[in-house]
Image: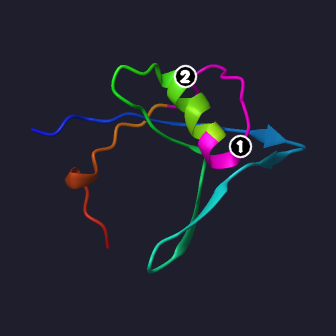
Amino acid sequence: MNSIRNSAKAIIIKNGKVLLTKNKSQLEVFYLLPGGGQNKFERLEDALRRECREEIGVDIEVGDIVFIREYIGRNHQFA
């Protein structure tokens, strides 16, 4: 049985603009909030700090949790 891996995303707003990362797959270009997966035994806020350093090259201050979404990809169908 596979374990569930949490992901943390940052909502970074500056001058009324939201920071997104531009990503490309073989079929499309899409945008995401910066952040990513939590490693085993890592606190969620530490995962968010690490991911933001990796993806956007900045140290962030982590605030309150704004939104939680349960999502398990294998349980969803994509068009």
Q: Nearer the viewer, residue 23 or 18?
A: 23
SS for tag 1? loop
Percent from the top left, x then y, of residue 39?
Answer: 38, 31
Numbered tag placed on residue 22 in the rendering: none
The residue most toward the bottom is 27
Q: What are the residue bounds of the magenta stretch?
A: 54-67
SS for tag 2? helix
Percent from the top left, x then y, of residue 30?
Answer: 56, 67
68 versus 27 height, above or below: above
Report the side of 64 relative to 69 (left or right).
right
Asked whether residue 61 is drawn in magenta, I would say: yes
Q: Residues within 10 Å of mark 2 (few under 14, many from 20)?
A: some
* Amino acid type at mark 2: Glu
Numbered tag placed on residue 45 in the rendering: 2
Give the labeled residue for mark 1. 57
* Amino acid type at mark 1: Gly
Q: Quadrant of the C terminus?
A: bottom left
Q: What residue is at 65 percent from the left and 38 percent from the top?
A: 53
Q: Quadrant of the N terminus?
A: top left
Counting residues from the N terminus, which is met first, the one under dot 2 or under dot 1? 2
Q: Nearer the viewer, mark 2 or mark 1?
A: 1
Q: What is the magenta segment's predominant secondary structure? A: loop
Q: What residue is at 51 percent from the left and 29 percent from the top?
A: 47
Percent from the top left, x then y, of residue 62?
Answer: 66, 23
Q: What residue is at 33 percent from the left and 26 percent from the top?
A: 40
Q: Residues within 10 Å of mark 1 (few under 14, many from 20)?
A: few
Colour scheme employed for the rendering of this structure: rainbow
74 versus 16 height, above or below: below
Report the side of 35 relative to 15 (left or right).
left
61 versus 50 height, above or below: above
Report the side of 77 relative to 23 (left or right).
left
Q: Nearer the viewer, residue 58 or 63?
A: 58
